[in-house]
Amino acid sequence: MRTTLLAMAIATIAITPPATAGTLEQVTSFGSNPGALTMWRYRPTTPAPAAPLVLFMHGCSQTHSDAALVGWTQLADQYGFYLVFPEQATGNNPIRCFNWAGEYGDPANLVRGQGENLSLKQMVDKMKTDHDIDPARVYVAGFSAGAAFASVMLATWPDVFAAGAVMAGIPYRCATTVNGAYNCQALASHAELKKTPAEWGDLVRNAYPGYSGARPRVAIFHGSSDAIVSPDNQIELVEQWTNVLGADQTADETATIAGHERARHKVGAATVVESWRVAAMGHAVSMGADPDRACPPTGGTYIENRGMCAAYRAALFFGITGGTVEPPSDGGMPDAGTGPDAGPGPDGGTVPGAPTVTITAPGDGDEVDGSVTIAADASAGDGVARVEFKVDGVLKGSDGSAPYSYRWPTANAAAGAHTIEAIVYDRWEVSASDSIDVMVGDGDGNPDDPTRVDPIPCGCSGGGAASATGLGGLVALLVGFVRRRRVPGSPS
């Protein structure tokens, strides 16, 4: 499968102290700490009685200082909750990645009560001992490798966390090896790693066998132009957590807010999974002039000013902001219209013309088999931002430059009728769609036919190590490079 992403714009700014009045301090003793992590605590100006607690984990090459610069400390001062910013050590990972895929085939960090996940649990316990923390309002969030490890914590400690936020992250147990981690990051090119919702859900359920209590709700944020962690991971994360939480994969509510897509999956009236596709954003955390609560960037790395405050939106989802005011369901965006100058744009201009899209292959009613290339022609008066491809209503991939296409491995689909949809978006997130129906055959009975499944690009050099080319070496940011064995309760 080929996914061509839009250009990534990562704002890397000199770190400056956050303009807050609370206290950020290191905690030097919080248990046996088998993962050899460092704990930083943020005490808000005026803690609320029975205060909530949020753990937020940084990405690769970052530290606790970067984590403190994406808006959480200001929210903590406003709403009175505590924060913990865990910090990875170079002795565990040379570029400070939380080891979300284990360490060279050693999955100890992914097993409940071992390695880094136990260290993080001990940080929570320390906060409960030292402060007036409501144990029913403990949350975990992270960015990049920290987000992938937030998935680990949600899976392994469902009895500790009420909800979580995964920002540019990866599903739990997508990989347990180094090469697997590279391939999960480039998931758009590795359909063999994608799973059914039930298969993803089973990985989570098996992380704590026999657990029958409540599961944490999950918010998922991902940039549509992320070239480091494929946006296809967002699709798989939605499938994993909707399955775990008893919802289906069809959103019950959608909205466009500040130009970004929000989808909510519900069980009854409760939103259990909320997914944000941040338009045109690369591998970053979104900040800026959010229509509900602005959080202007004040420094740090991997931050983009996208007019939406991801930290605030996560806190809102957690329910720790003391009340919510929802923006209009249409986010103030223009309707698509039918011709030139179709309507006012969000920046005071006009929409030069409605986008259009036509699926050019396969043909409507065709019988298909093997690996099928879905192709589409698309246009927009102000330029095409991307074309997304859905099969039976499930988003499978996107393409940000012409010719727009997606390769669908039909070996993973049941024989019979399927609906293919292509959706084009312009830079204002105005959209149009086209759909066709095709019939998937039952194949020729030859399981070795290479056309029946996606080929796996090598991506290798030398003795099997993943190549650092293609993504400018930044792919390596999420992969562990040292091998160690952590056992429950063992000192570093």
Image (spheres, helix red, strand yellow):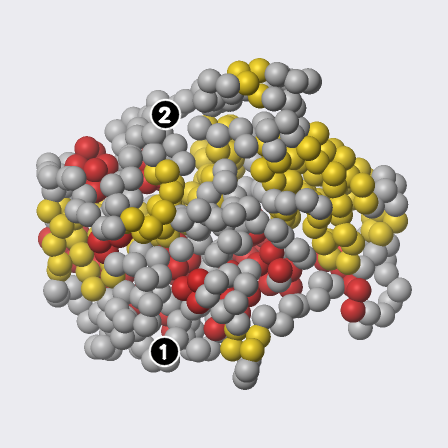
Residue farthest toward the bottom in the current orientation of the protein: 463
Residue 413 visible in the shown view: no
Residue assigned mark 1: 482
Q: Secondary structure at mark 2?
A: loop
Q: Residue type at mark 2? A: Pro
Q: Residue at x 44, y 78 (%)?
A: 104
Q: Quadrant of the N terminus?
A: bottom right
The correct choice, above or below, for 292 with respect to 369 in the image is above
Position of residue 244 in the picture relative to residue 337 (left or right): left
Q: Secondary structure at mark 1?
A: loop
Residue 439 visible in the shown view: yes
Position of residue 476 in the picture relative to residue 68 (left or right): right
* Residue 129 spot, x, y in % from top left: 13, 55
Q: Quadrant of the C terminus?
A: bottom left
Among the 4 quarters of the image, the one containing residue 117: bottom left
* Residue 419 spot, x, y in % from top left: 76, 40
